[in-house]
Amino acid sequence: MFGLFGRKRSKDHVKERLKLVLSYDRAKLSPGRMEQLKQELMGVITKYFPASESDYDVKLEQHGDRMVFVANLPLSQADA
Amino acid sequence: MNARAIVVTSGKGGVGKTTTTANVGAALARQGEKVCVIDTDVGLRNLDVVMGLEGRVVFDLIDVFEGRCRLRQALVRDKRVETLHLLPASQTSDKSALSEGRMQETVRMLTEEEGFDRVLIDSPAGIESGFQTAASAADGALVVVNPEVSSVRDADRIIGLLEARDITDVRLVVNRLRPEMVKRGDMLEVDDVLEILGVKLIGIVPEDERILVSTNVGSPAALDEASRNGAGGAFRDIAKRIRGEDVPYAQLQAQGGLLTGLRRLFGGG
């Protein structure tokens, strides 16, 4: 992934950026709407157990032919 | 490819649709097929000049659509390859003159009544009516893509639209690849593009100055048998693969890079 001197090659950048933007394109969802979805999801989740936004990770992933919405919501240690 | 009517498309402009249509069409004809290339970029006709046939255009696609001439009258026969024909776009009409029904009927007549083995349809850039009309008559597609962020994104969109039209025989032409940039990690590799787009490959065409020279003089590079490696040869290989031949992919050499220099120094390839 990294070149001779630890420099990330520009093609690795473009590949990552393309994968991300195409996942939004294919899901017909803009990154801004995704952020809204995340906020609303946060609101619902925190009604049931405490959590901080920094622990949240929501993203779209390509699994074979399908786009999958992945939400990673770890419970905080105190409540587990 | 089983498809007989193949739309050449890309979404983004300037990636080589017309060059690909002219060269693959010429190569298919040289290899023995009776080929018609159709320019559907109404208002921005260019396939005629790229092929060097601009001086012999009398009627055009819209004349055929609107009954001002018979289909056969609008066909321009190539001077170099007898089995190659061009159906030019109109330069004066606009895209509102296009019709999916007429397009489908025209392609049907070419394959069923005029005896054409293959019809290549050069699509305009974009995803609007021009592209839709071009795709409406096709049962296969060549998607031309440059290894570059906007071209790959637009290709993905086009592939989705082709799928929506139930065109499943879709193959990718990676055009204007620069091996020396790939080698130093500054250009997407073919495998990267295939992984991102999830479509089968049919050709890798290197960036090649001779393409501009060939369009300057109006003679498709694929007809220059002397150019073995380079874009002309790559287009000939694409034609062979369309015809079902199993042609191995030529190893593209980076020219004059540090690595090749070193390898030369030590007597390697």
Image (cartoon, coloured by chain):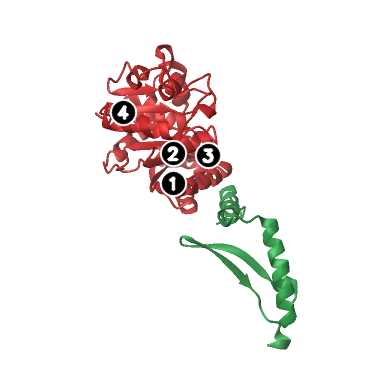
Chain colours: A green, B red
Instruction: State the residue in front, B224 or A53.
Output: A53
Residue that mark 2 sits on: B135
**Which badge, 4 or 1, comes first in the chain's sequence?**
4
Q: Residues within 10 Å of mark 2 (few under 14, many from 20)?
A: many
Q: CA distance from mark 4 to mark 1?
A: 24 Å
Q: Amino acid at mark 4?
A: Val
Q: Which residue is mark 3?
A: B11
Front: mark 3 or 1: 1
Give neighbour class at mark 1: few <14, some 14-19, many 20+ (Cα, 10 Å).
some
Identify which amino acid the numbered label 2 is placed on. Answer: Ala
The answer to whether tags 3 and 4 share a subunit is yes
Q: Residues under labels 3 and 1: Cα distance?
A: 15 Å
SS class, disc 2: helix
Element on which disc 4 rests = strand
In three-dimensional space, the C-alpha distance between marks 2 and 1, rounded to whole angstroms, equals: 8 Å
Mark 1 element type: loop
Kind of residue sitting beneath label 3:
Gly
Label 3, label 4: how far apart the Cα atoms are: 24 Å
- Compared with B67, B3 (above or below) is below
Q: Which mark is residue B117?
A: none
- In the image, what residue type sits under mark 1? Arg
Determine whether label 4 and label 1 are within 8 Å by CB.
no
Q: Please report whichever mark, 3 or 1, sits nearer to the chain's N-terminal start.
A: 3
In front here: A38 or B100?
B100
Q: Which of the two marks, 4 or 2, is nearer to us in this view? A: 2
Which of the 4 image quarters holds residue B122? top left
What residue does disc 4 label? Answer: B35
Label 4 marks a residue whose chain is B
Looking at the picture, how far across and down is residue B244, in whole percent? 27, 42
Kindly report which numbered mark, 3 or 2, lies closer to the viewer in this rendering.
2
